[in-house]
Image (cartoon, rainbow, N blue to C red):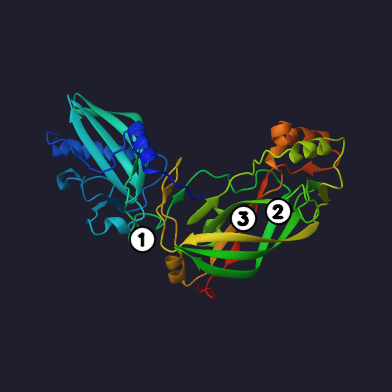
Amino acid sequence: MRASVTLPLLLLLATIFGASLTGISQKSDSLKPADAQTIITMMFELEFKERESTGEILISPRLKKEWIPTNGDFKFRQLAYSEEKNVAEYYEISLQSQSGVVLASLNKGDACVKAGRRYSFEKRGAEWVAKEVGSIRSHSPGITCPGCVVGSGRRYTVEEWRPNTNQRQPGLRLNAKITDLSCSRVANYVSCEIGLNLDFSNTSQLPVIFMKPFEENPEGSYTHCATYVAYTRTAASQDEFIDSSYFGSNYSGLQKYKVMANEIDQAEPSEKLFRTLKPGEVVAWKRKIQYTVSQENACDSVIGSTIGTEIGWREIKKLNQPLWMRVSFELWPVDIERYKQNLGMRLNYKWEKFGSLWADELVSEPFELDFSKQNP
C-alpha cells in the first residue's frame, strides 16, 4: 500500500518516537569500545532472538569503527557512504552514555526510511542489563533510493500491514490467468491494465455460498482490494513480496447497502444476490485490474509499519524472468456490516443447512506475470 506523508507530520512522528532525522549514530565520546561492542552485540541478539541472522549484517557508515564487534556469532560489514543509498536494508546504531546509563537504538531500513527499537543499558557489576524502552522511526526528506545493489538477506523488503493471504476459511479457491496486458508510462510511473480470467472453485465437501459479482448483481460488486508481487511462485505462496499494494475495504457509507443488508438478512440465501457452488464445481468470471509501479525502486514515505524498498519498473525489466502476482477481491461488501454488525457470522450459522457462507475477502492463487513484451 503506497502512502504519502507530509514533512510536518514526519517531524511530529520523529518527536513522538524519539527519531533522528539526521541519522547521527553516536553522541558520546566516553563509552569504552569494549562496552560499546558488548551493547551492540546484545542488541543484535535481541533482534535475532526469534529468527536467524541471514549472513553478513550491513551497518551504517556513521558508526565508530572501534565500536563494531569483531568477535561472536555475527558478521558485520560497514557500508561506505557511496553504498548507502543503494542498499535495501541496513542498520543505523545510536549509543549515548548518560550518568552510567547507555541509551541505545537499533534502527533498520534504507537511506530513506528506518524503524526499530530503543533500549537502555545499565551495568550491574561486570554485566550489562538491557531494557526495551520504546520504538524509533526516522525519515530522511529529499533522499531518493534508486536501487538495491548490495544487501543483507533479501534484496528487497516490503513489510506492511495486510491481511494474511492464506485462506482464512476452507472451501473457496480463486485461480487467475492473464488474458491481456497493456502498459503505458504516466509521469514517473508505469501503469498496466491487466485482463484476468478468474475461476472460483469449491474445494471442500460442502456447498459454498458467496455473493454474485456486479455483472450479475449491480449491488454486489467485487472490489479489487489488493495486489501482491513476488519473484517466484513459492515466494508468492509464502507472502514474500517485492511489491505490495493494499487498497483496503470499500467503506462508502451509501444508503443502498442498508437496503442490501435487509435483503440479505433472510431465512435463506437470495438467488438474486448469491451463488451456491457445489463441491468440485467451478464458475468463471472476467475482470480488468490496474497495476501501477514507479519507474525506479521506491522508498515510500511511511504510515504504520511500512518499511523497505518496493521494486521499480527499471529493475523489473532487468530481471529477464516473469514475476508472480496474487490479487484480492472483496466478496462481502463491508458496508453491510456497518448497518448490521456481524451479519456474515450470524448468517453463516443461520444458513448452515444450505452450505458455508464466504463473508470475507478472497485472495487468488499465484499466477505468472510476464512483462517481457511491454516497453512503454
Element type where label 2 sits in the image = strand
Q: Which numbered disc, 2 or 3, marks the residue that appears first in the sequence?
A: 2
Element type where label 3 sits in the image = strand
User: Visible in this render: residue 236?
Assistant: yes
Badge nearest the viewer, 2 or 1? 1
Q: Which numbered disc, 2 or 1, marks the residue that appears first in the sequence?
A: 1
Q: Residue 305's quadrant in the figure?
A: top left
Q: Which numbered disc, 3 or 1, marks the residue that appears first in the sequence?
A: 1
**Vertical arrangement, residue 184 with respect to residue 80, above or below:** below
* Amino acid tagged 2: Arg
Picture residue at 16% right of the left edge, 38% below the top:
34
Badge nearest the viewer, 3 or 1? 1
Badge nearest the viewer, 2 or 3? 3
Which percent across, then down, holds residue 346?
A: 77, 32
Asked whether, in this view, residue 256 is left or right of residue 179, the answer is: right
Which percent across, then down, holds residue 271?
A: 87, 47
Picture residue at 80% right of the left edge, 46% below the top:
209
Residue assigned mark 2: 173
Nearer to me, 158 or 42: 158
Residue assigned mark 1: 146
Residue assigned mark 3: 327
Which percent across, then down, holds residue 302?
A: 42, 44
